[in-house]
Image: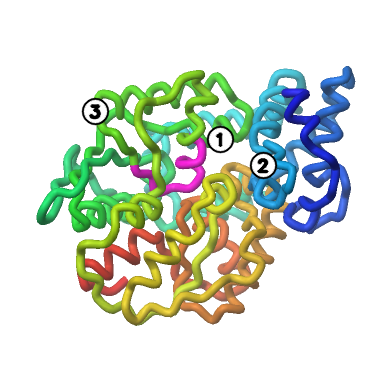
Amino acid sequence: MDPDLIGDCVHCGFCLPTCPTYVLWGEEMDSPRGRIHLMKQHVEGTPVTPEMAGHFDACLGCMACVTACPSGVRYDRLIEQTRAEVERAHERDPQERAVRGLVFGLFPYPRRLRLTRPGTGLVRRLAPFLERAHPSLGAMAALAPEVRRRQRLPRLVRARGPRRAVVGMLTGCVQGEFFPQVNAATARVLALEGCDVLIPAGQGCCGALSVHAGREDQARRLARRTVRAFRRAGVEVVVVNAAGCGSSMKEYGELLGEEPGFRVMDLSEFLVELGPAAERRPLPLTVAYHDACHLAHAQGVRSQPRELLRGIPGLDLREVPDSAICCGSAGTYNIFQPEAARDLGDLKAKAVGSTGAGLLVSANPGCTMQIAAAMRRQGAEIKVAHTAEVLDASLRGVSL
């Protein structure tokens, strides 16, 4: 933990109302400035106690406090450093170690995830029974999406019409295996907007889940593999359609000690910078747009998705109340902290429901699963889609 970064915090309290766990519990040690105080204690010699580790584990890493902080405190770097220290210094109980081993031995590996695809429907039905064995297993089962037919993407998707750009595209792990239709829509949208899309083999997981959980060695190994794949492809820009992945890839320089050699951009960020070329056809939809934390807070990408959605004729875009508060997904948080995640998911589902929208649009697979599960619990299922899917439907003139 960097003492200089810790010293930047002046304990003003601007972060408190933006912190989801402080909103839930009102506990000082479960706020950003409270956790920074604990970090300072550890740097000054206090060992990582189970109670201290619990307060750090309870943080979602949503970065809303980074947006709110007037002093520019790098809480994002601090919590990642702290989680790495917790993983080194704190001995977790055997059950917790086993669950973490399962999650990090499965989710960052697309081929292993692929084996779970046929059983997702059954697993969701078994969620109550799995919860009795361990709350994290029950949470994982309840989140399981209805998996679409797997779609194989070619290594090169040619631009439609005059070529305006050449980009690489990250397929990801969870996105690629559980939401293949999002990657297919992303490639089509980019091609329709005049881009050659390179989708290199061997890219795998970008390392986001691991780095956010303090598993630095695994994160670096996965990040290096991803960098090698896109360097071989020779692209200058890599387009990412998952908020958590984009956030981590933009910080590869800090993780790896060297810049990757290409620019990382969220899909919406890239499309707005490129400018529209293809015709937008009407979509008569009422849409609620959800700000994924690692897109809005970590990357500062807020206006671009809204600009793209508002550019579709006939689409009615509605804002979700308290949009800056995390939905409770936060990578693996909804698995390791299922109770808090459930409470936050219920708050978000209520807010989404208040918009009266028939479609929820999000730019992160974890958020999509989390909010959809919360809506099911409330008996108010809502159709969900990625920004890319909405644009794809408009550009091709098809319904969602």
Spot occupied by residue 82 in the image (x, y as percentages of width and height): 72, 28
Q: Residue at x 28, y 78 (%)?
A: 282
Above or below for 383 versus 258: below
Q: Is residue 232 visible?
A: yes
Proximity of marks 1 and 2: CB atoms separated by less than 8 Å? yes
Spot occupied by residue 374 in the image (x, y as percentages of width and height): 60, 64
Which residue occupies the extreme left position in the image?
161
What is the span of residues highlighted in magenta in the rendered image? Answer: 239-248
Above or below for 194 versus 389: above
What residue is disc 3 on? Answer: 234
Above or below for 238 versus 314: above
The quarter in which the C terminus is drawn is bottom left
What residue is disc 2 on? Answer: 336
From the viewer's perspective, tell me whether residue 180 is left or right of residue 318. left
State how far apart marks 1 and 3 are (Cα). Answer: 32 Å
What residue is disc 1 on? Answer: 103
